[in-house]
Image: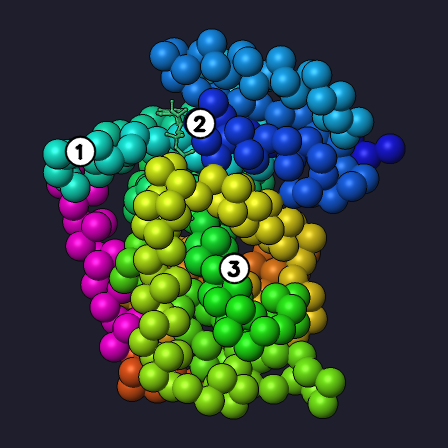
Amino acid sequence: AKEPVRVLVTGAAGQIGYALVPMIARGVMLGPDQPVILHMLDIPPAAEALNGVKMELIDAAFPLLKGVVATTDVVEACTGVNIAVMVGGFPRKEGMERKDVMSKNVSIYKAQASALEKHAAANCKVLVVANPANTNALILKEFAPSIPEKNITCLTRLDHNRALGQVSERLNVQVSDVKNVIIWGNHSSSQYPDVNHATVKTPSGEKPVRELVKDDAWLNGEFITTVQQRGAAIIKARKLSSALSAASSACDHIRDWVLGTPEGTWVSMGVYSDGSYNVPAGLIYSFPVNCRNGEWTIVQELGIDAFSRKKLDATAAELSEEKALAYSCLS
Ligand code: NAI
């Protein structure tokens, strides 16, 4: 039998946490033959709720779940973890300035970076979900210098999956037959959902999405804004943020990272930029990636037309500005 993998979920008493921990315990994240031990962290005001989640995990009698640590102590939470899914954070409240939210989150991620660096298992893989996801991940990377930068990522897979979903709805095809959309940049409304390399499996072979949709105005307009603003549309409808789809996409992100992407398929991940596609190095930016042997690599040499170039640059500019704001909060 396989050794259990320890998976940390921060903010585990929150909405995404509540959707995510049962998926992990059922094997959705790491596969149906991989036992797991869940480490759940939240803050003292949520301690009782967190304990309730632990009770439910016990009650669900998941065969793969070999243990549950539920704690408000960040060191206990981080000790020995192989995978860390960082969902905990400070939400933006009515009347708060962007800088105030940034400041709260940056100090959380700075502190948790140190705890992970000191106490997590060697080669721990980190996924930041909490917003501002890219910049929180960047701060985590900067304050955990001994964790390889390749191990620190943020979630844009939800946006990627939303883009697949929009194409599938529009063409009335199965979502599993659509692939290779790309989310470039920030997990914010400046992100660029790009279909220029996306394809659909049809009875007569793989066809470019652009050829099938035949409506560039939609692809260059409403498609992009729908994906960019889907989070807000869900909040409006549900009065709560998108927890089910965020949790499911977080599982997709880790599963593909650990177990690999299928041949000929890429996914979007927020990763540390090495300057590929002339994106400034030193930002956490969403790129198309392939995963093999537990490592991602940025897909190279995709054509970028003038329309796309502007959008790649605009979302990079927003991330540079967020980075500067984050640093101004720390000094
Ligand atoms: P939520 O407010 O229901 O849960 C957040 C949890 O984090 C709460 O239980 C809170 O007590 C906890 N928390 C706060 N500070 C903490 C700390 N220092 N350490 C540990 N836990 C802490 O929020 P929800 O809906 O679960 O969303 C979580 C985050 O994910 C938000 O920042 C949200 O904006 C973000 N998000 C990101 C998405 C993405 O695609 N990257 C998609 C959807 C949401």
Residue carrying label 3: 161
Q: CA distance from mark 3 to mark 2?
A: 22 Å
What span is colored magenta in the figure? 310-329
Please name whichever residue, 133 or 279, is drawn nearer the observer in this view of the structure: 133
* Local secondary structure at mark 3: helix
- Which quarter of the frame holds ligand 1? top left
Q: Along the polypeptide, which appears first: circle 3 or circle 2?
A: 2
* Local secondary structure at mark 1: loop
Q: Magenta span: helix, strand or loop, mainly?
A: helix
Q: Is mark 3 within 8 Å of ligand 1?
A: no
Q: Give the numbered dot on residue 94.
A: 1
Q: CA distance from mark 1 to mark 3?
A: 29 Å
Lateral position of residue 328 relative to residue 268, left or right: left
* Local secondary structure at mark 2: loop
Please name whichever residue, 12 or 224, is drawn nearer the observer in this view of the structure: 224
Q: CA distance from mark 2 to mark 1?
A: 19 Å
Q: Pick out the residue farthest to the right.
A: 1
Q: Amino acid at mark 1?
A: Glu
How would you rate the neighbour count of disc 3 (Cα within 10 Å): few for under 14, some for 14-19, many for 20 or more? many
Residue carrying label 2: 14
Residue 102, given in percent of the width and then of the height, sits at 22, 38
Residue 17 visible within the image: yes
Where 16 sits versus 301, above or below? above
Q: Is residue 324 magenta?
A: yes
Q: Residue at x 44, y 27 (%)?
A: 14
Q: Is mark 2 within 8 Å of ligand 1?
A: yes
Q: In what quadrant of the picture does the N terminus appear? A: top right
